[in-house]
Amino acid sequence: MSDLNMSDLNMSDLNMSDIREETPRSNKKLREALYGGALFLLAPTDASLRLVEAAGVQVRDVFKEFDDPRQAQHELDDGQFFRRVGELRRRLFTQENFHRAIGELVREKGFDPAQVAFDPIRIRAIAHEGHKNEAAAPVYYAHRDTWYGHPQSLITWWIPLDDLEEEETFVFYPERFARAVPNDSEIFDYRDWVRDGPELRIGWQDEDASKEETYPGVIGEVEPGREVGFRCQSGQSLLFSGAHFHRTREQESGRTRFSMDFRIVHLGDEEAGLGAPNVDNRSRGLALVDYERIDD
Ligand SMILES: [Fe+2]
């Protein structure tokens, strides 16, 4: 690890309780801060609002007979709801316009698009009382995104479709960013994960997949330390290192939470060995081989 990264780590230990609202002036400094554990919740932009609009069109289309898609779960059984969400997930993950949207977002934040590889958008529907559905259990596991075969330079980018209260979002455990959590990430091999095609990985086909698949998780009871949560506005961008330990909240707000997330890697940084410290990730296989590139 470079000296630069070590100094960023020390810096972030001091003020990680804050979710920052402004990025550093240069993209390089932004990346360094992210690798050091900084969290950024940034104002909506032209590109993020266009993406939210385009995603909203798809949500309304998939739930077209409902006035409010966020209430549709109450009229559908678990299987019907899962299949609608699966169709939505397929569209956002695969459609070209949603790939282009990632290019626009990274350009706005000063990334060199030629250096960026991305794992496409996953739209998530966190149902009211979704945690009571056994098949959805893995959604609520505390985890690091890197435990799924991603590199330590992983940056996760999260955008809500709606204004959300704190109970509808998720929490970070900053004290565990650079401290190991007992886990079984060694059971995860990316090559097994994608062997049967993207349907399982993205979750638009097999309702029972989560019962059969093995997901990396925490071993035993862990005292994760201080929780950092947040509320947010539609179209904001939350940027964080994929090595952050975090957990989706169980929510009973009476409505479904829709959000999007995608992952990026700066290829120059990855090649140079930059990224968050690896304290406990033993997952195998390289998800990076399937990342997409931004077209000009
Ligand atoms: Fe995550």
Image (cartoon, rainbow, N blue to C red):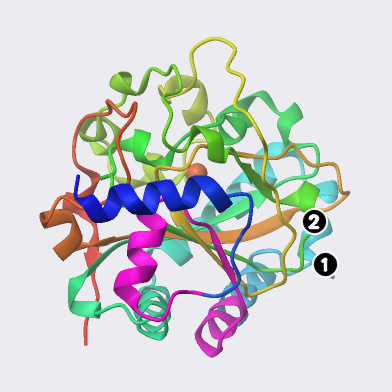
Q: Is residue 107 magenta?
A: no
Residue wearing tag 1 = 68
Residue 129 place in picture, x, y as percent:
80, 37
How many angstroms separate mark 2 from mark 1 (CA)? 7 Å
Give the position of the C terminus as an image quadrant.
bottom left
Q: Nearer the viewer, residue 214 or 15?
A: 15
Vertically, is 31 above or below 281? Answer: below
In the image, which disc is placed on residue 43? none
Corner quadrant of residue 292: bottom left
Q: Is residue 20 left or right of residue 67?
A: left
Residue wearing tag 2 = 72
Highlighted range, magenta: 23-52
Residue 270 place in picture, x, y as percent:
18, 55
Residue at 34% over, 26% down? 280
Are circles 2 and 1 on residues that touch, CB within 8 Å?
Answer: yes
Q: Tally the marks.
A: 2
Amino acid type indicated by mark 1: Asp
